[in-house]
Image (cartoon, grey):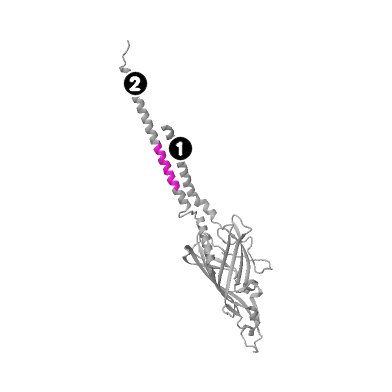
């Protein structure tokens, strides 16, 4: 019985040592092999963000009708962006399509729609930077086809492991990349984030887009540059539309997820960048509370996934700790089993020696027959 028990303990010890070693090896390999696989933009990504604010908006019909107060102020606006994953997408690349609408919420349906675009870009799943093939595109009208629009900056997501540095950021309205600079480390709803900001100096949208809607020729009197009936009242003056923006973005640094943001956007007609002759659109907007809560929750879940966290501690730490405990337990059990076996063997040899001595005594004392 003792021998069977000792054999069972030896088997248990071997199993524990093997299991402990397996857990330790798994804990070491997870960061090396699993984490790089997880640090990629998900192929099931779907994001809806909503920004709200107030705006000053040019009423074109009233302006062309000669109304000097054609710019409406304190107009409530809502900007919505819906991002989905489209083909081609795969192991290394992901194609994102972003439908964007800007609406005034005091008007219903088409009357309230101020702008709508569909943007499409294929990104590297790790760096979040656009690739050349397939080319990115932008659709600015419902009827018109999308046009190719190459780019070389971030837009909808930052790379994994964001650094406290400047990054190239592509502005869709300006059609150009402007570096966005690290400002500070802060928290939003308890989540550590990095704050980035850039300021886009006046961009001539007619030169940037070559769209005729961004260049307008009207009599000087219509622009308010001359009195009606004056000698130069009918002289046509061309003005281009200019665009500026101050953009703030808040990014969770482990995953590169954008969790909050705000814009101070201005568009105006002028004869030069510093000539704000006529406001077209001016608004300050930021992501609403519901969007921020959703983005923080999503970023937190993705961060825990990338860091292999299933609770307060990362999974490799839990596996490593459990593996070490199991390994030590197996070694201790094995050593104890060996000691018990040695004691048993020693006890058996002593008993055999005593029996032999006893037998010798009996043989010596037994009367000899002649």
Q: Position of residue 277 (x, y in %)?
A: 59, 80
Q: Main secondary structure of the magenta part?
A: helix
Looking at marks 1 and 2 on the same chain, the residue that comes earlier in the sequence is marked by: 1
Q: Residue at x 50, y 56 (%)?
A: 304
Asked if residue 153 can be seen in this view, the reply is no
Q: Quadrant of the rendered structure where residue 287 is?
A: bottom right
In this image, 73 relative to 193: left or right?
Answer: right
Quadrant of the frame with the C terminus = top left
Residue designated by label 2: 359
SS category of the residue bearing label 1: helix
Q: Residue at x 52, y 52 (%)?
A: 34
Where is 279 relative to 227, above or below?
Answer: above
Verify whether residue 186 appears in magenta: no
In this image, 80 relative to 26: left or right?
Answer: right
**C-alpha separation, residue under disc 1 versus residue under disc 2:** 39 Å
Q: Residue at x 44, y 34 (%)?
A: 7
SS category of the residue bearing label 2: helix
Answer few, some or many: residues within 10 Å of disc 2's Cα (few below 14, many 20 plus, some between 14 and 19).
Answer: few
Total numbered labels placed on residues in the image: 2
Q: Quadrant of the rendered structure where residue 80 is?
A: bottom right
Residue designated by label 1: 11
**Residue segment shown in magenta:** 322-337
* Nearer to me, 51 or 266: 51
Q: Which mark is residue 328?
A: none
Whether residues under marks 1 and 2 lie with C-beta atoms below 8 angstroms apart, the answer is no
Quadrant of the frame with the N terminus = top left
Asked if residue 25 can be seen in this view, the reply is yes
Answer few, some or many: residues within 10 Å of disc 1's Cα (few below 14, many 20 plus, some between 14 and 19).
Answer: some
Q: Position of residue 119 (x, y in %)?
A: 62, 65
In this image, 232 relative to 310: left or right?
Answer: right
Q: Position of residue 155 (x, y in %)?
A: 57, 65
């Amino acid at each position: 019985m003792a021998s069977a028990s000792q054999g069972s303990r030896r088997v248990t010890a071997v199993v524990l040592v093997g299991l402990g070693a397996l857990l330790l090896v798994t804990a070491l390999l997870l960061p090396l092999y699993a984490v790089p696989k997880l640090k990629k933009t998900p192929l099931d990504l779907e994001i809806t963000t909503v920004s709200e604010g107030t705006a000053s908006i040019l009423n074109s019909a009233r302006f062309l009708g000669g109304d000097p107060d054609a710019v409406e102020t304190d107009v409530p606006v809502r900007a919505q962006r819906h991002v989905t994953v489209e083909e081609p997408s795969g192991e290394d690349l992901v194609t994102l399509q972003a439908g964007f609408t800007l609406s005034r919420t005091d008007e219903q349906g088409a009357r309230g729609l101020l702008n709508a675009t569909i943007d499409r870009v294929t990104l590297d799943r790790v760096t979040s930077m656009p690739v050349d093939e397939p080319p990115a595109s932008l659709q600015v009208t419902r009827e018109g086809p999308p046009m190719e629009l190459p780019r070389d900056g971030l837009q909808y997501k930052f790379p994994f492991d964001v650094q406290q540095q400047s990054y190239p950021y592509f502005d869709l309205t300006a059609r150009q990349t402007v570096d966005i600079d690290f400002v500070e480390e802060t928290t939003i709803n308890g989540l550590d984030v990095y704050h980035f900001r850039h300021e886009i100096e006046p961009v001539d949208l007619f030169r940037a887009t070559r769209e005729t809607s961004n260049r307008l020729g009207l009599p000087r009197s219509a622009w308010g540059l001359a009195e009606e009936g004056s000698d130069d009242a009918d002289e046509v003056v061309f003005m281009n539309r200019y665009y500026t923006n101050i953009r703030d973005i808040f990014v969770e640094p482990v995953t590169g997820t954008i969790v909050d943001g705000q814009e101070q956007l201005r568009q105006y007609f002028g004869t030069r960048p510093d000539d704000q002759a006529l406001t077209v659109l001016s608004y300050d907007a930021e992501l609403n509370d519901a969007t921020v809560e959703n983005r923080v929750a999503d970023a937190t879940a993705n961060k825990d996934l990338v860091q292999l966290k299933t609770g307060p501690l990362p999974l490799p730490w839990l596996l490593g700790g459990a593996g070490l405990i199991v390994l030590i337990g197996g070694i201790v059990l094995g050593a104890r089993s060996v000691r018990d076996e040695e004691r048993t063997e020693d006890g058996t040899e002593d008993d055999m020696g005593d029996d032999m001595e006893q037998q010798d005594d009996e043989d010596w004392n037994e009367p000899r027959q002649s």
